[in-house]
Amino acid sequence: MTDIAVVDYGMGNLRSVSKALEHVAPNQNVIVTSDPARIAAAGRVVFPGQGAMPDCMRELDARGLRDSIIAAAAEKPFLGICIGLQMLFEHSEEGDAAGLGILKGRVQRFAAADMQDEHGIKLKVPHMGWNRVHQQMDHPLWRGIADGERFYYVHSYYVVPEDQDLEAGYSEYPKRFTCAIARGNLFAVQFHPEKSHDAGLQLLSNFVQWDGVF
């Protein structure tokens, strides 16, 4: 039995992620680790996090985890969550920070000028709470999840992929933004599946059963 490694680079509450994985995969070994060797040996890797992009990148590099993440994202079933999605891209407006550059594209902030709904009511940033996810492709991680299901968000920035074919799902706040991407063995989401009740647990269950083929 191979491990499911949850990457610990000192940012965010990893307990909720690991507990949700343990719940959907009681017969598998879930480890929270900052050890590059254990990440390399794991059968699956989950890359979560929350916080500011510059801080996350600094902490990732301080722990010598950059190469481990790049390798895992290329070689095995890999799930990015929240800032773990944003860090996969080339650059973020947040702190003018460079990301890992695994995927081409940028991360940008919700524009203040756009922050009102169809009734003219002002919307807050960060985008916090439940929102519908519209599926853009038939992917194994969407199995058993209805199109338009609600997931839980906490974020002020969102990804803009250079290749729109990467988009596995989108939400609207108030304009459309990419909230899930997929490429080969890699899947990543802006929302928090570990906080998204049944739909989130279904996505995590799909991940722990996924062979990484798409």
Image (spheres, rainbow, N blue to C red):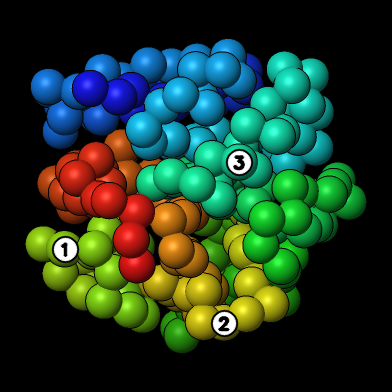
What residue is shown with label 2?
A: 164
Secondary structure under tag 1 reads loop
Give the residue type at disc 3. Ala
- According to the image, label 1 marks what residue? 143
- Residue 60 is left or right of residue 98, and the answer is left
How many callouts does the rendering have? 3
Q: Nearer the viewer, mark 1 or mark 3?
A: 3
Task: Name the image quarter holding residue 89.
Answer: bottom right
User: Pointers 1 and 3 in contact (CB under 8 A)?
Assistant: no
Q: Which residue is mark 3?
A: 71
Q: Secondary structure at mark 2?
A: helix
Tell me, yes or no, if residue 173 can be seen here. Answer: no
Q: Nearer the viewer, mark 2 or mark 3?
A: 3
Q: Nearer the viewer, residue 131 or 95?
A: 95
Q: Earlier in the sequence, mark 2 or mark 3?
A: 3
Q: Earlier in the sequence, mark 1 or mark 2?
A: 1
- In the picture shown, does residue 138 fall above or below 103? below
